[in-house]
Amino acid sequence: MAYNFIQNFTTVNFSKGNLGRKWIVIHYTGGKNDTAMANSNYFKNANRGASAHYFVDETTVVQVVKDEDTSWAVGRNYGSNNLFGKCTNSNSISIEMCSTDGKIATATYKNTVELTKSLMKKYGIDASRVVRHWDVCSKCCPGWNGWGAAGCDASIWNQFKKDIVSGTVATILTPSKTTNSQSSSSSSSSTSASKPTITFKYKVRAGGKWYPEVCNLADYAGVRGKAITDVAIGVTQGSVKYRVHVKGGSWLPYVTGYNTSDGNNGYAGNGREIDAIEVYYNTPSAYANKYGYKKAKYRVAVIGKDYYSWQYDNEKGNGMDGYAGAFGRSMDRFQICPN
């Protein structure tokens, strides 16, 4: 590891055990010239009513709460339409980035990326389950500009999400700024900056309610335990056509739109529980000629079960049946991205 690793466990600011490590939550301390060790000592023996599993600075990672125990980091809800209740203290690992006047140093960023990657690998946590404190309970954390909390510029956070899956670490941590018609990017790769980004946007309805839009694998659409009845899918490059199969019924017609107010072509579904979905992505010819053809990569989870295997467009063979899902089993989670 590039950083020094120290264990300095708190004796009071934690709860024994957890419900499984399913999420990683990124925070920042918001302090001035603070360090990982100073923070760990602050939480060491005095009852603070809060804690995190790890504190990270430019040289050091200090573990304050054991992974198999629960830290007190995301327990209060400050808003709505967030992950509160899904991602909890008892099913997540919290990482605090030390800051200087709220700003995260480049070395601290890199150490946080490496720590996050190691925890993802250790516990099989997907990048879609690496979230900000802001995503969980609408607290403005990480609050420095570039991390996207409270609607601020999210260029650093977007780069962080790339770095935890790409195997590389960005070296520029200046949030993008727009001046007139020109803009700069925090990306360290000129190739990725010039290549058009394909983003699937999607949302689902369950229990009579449309849930917030999800982009690619930033999260999943749906709520555990609630059967999905309608699905809307859009894409920033190219087009999609998709259809759903209703439980106890048949396949409904294909749709191509992305508009929850358009019951004809804006989404797939008729208010009945869905047990299968089929998606086909049409790559723009200009993009395909330069970068190759893409497919829709998608998967579902049925109520009470984990995700089924990834499906690619409407392909059959290799154990795949041309759609995601299982007839007779209501789905409650859905994910889609380009492949």
Image: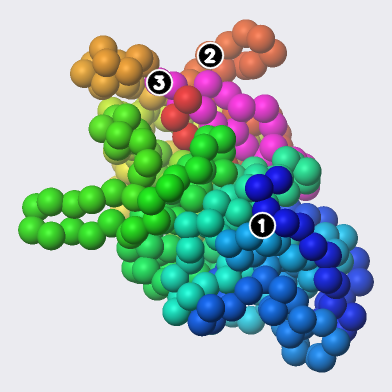
The 10 Å Cα crowd at callout 2, few under 14, some 14 to 19, many 20 or more, is some
User: Hey, what amino acid is under mark 3?
Assistant: Lys
Q: What element carries label 3?
A: loop
Q: Is mark 2 on a helix, strand or loop?
A: loop
Instruction: Estimate the spatial distance between the alpha carbons at disc 1 and disc 3, rounded to whole Å.
Output: 29 Å
Q: Name the colour scheme.
A: rainbow
Choose the circle earlier in sequence order: 2 or 1. Answer: 1
User: Hey, what amino acid is under mark 2?
Assistant: Glu
Report the side of 142 relative to 53 (left or right).
left
Residue 318 visible in rendering: yes
User: Hey, what amino acid is under mark 1?
Assistant: Ile
Residue 118 shown in magenta:
no
Mark drawn on residue 24: 1
Q: Which residue is drawn at 37% across and 41% down?
A: 188
Q: Which residue is drawn at 44% across and 70% down?
A: 103
Q: Which residue is drawn at 34% across and 50% down?
A: 186
Labels 2, 1: front one: 1
Numbered range of the magenta stretch: 294-312
The 10 Å Cα crowd at callout 3, few under 14, some 14 to 19, many 20 or more, is some
Choose the circle earlier in sequence order: 3 or 2. Answer: 3
Residue 305, x across and y down, in percent: 77, 42
Residue 310, x across and y down, in percent: 61, 27
Residue 212, x across and y down, in percent: 45, 58
**Disc 3: which residue:** 294
Q: Which of 304 and 95 is in front in this view?
A: 95
Q: What element carries label 1?
A: strand
Residue 81, x across and y down, in percent: 49, 68
Labels 1, 3: front one: 1
**Disc 2: which residue:** 315
Q: Nearer the viewer, residue 294 or 158?
A: 158
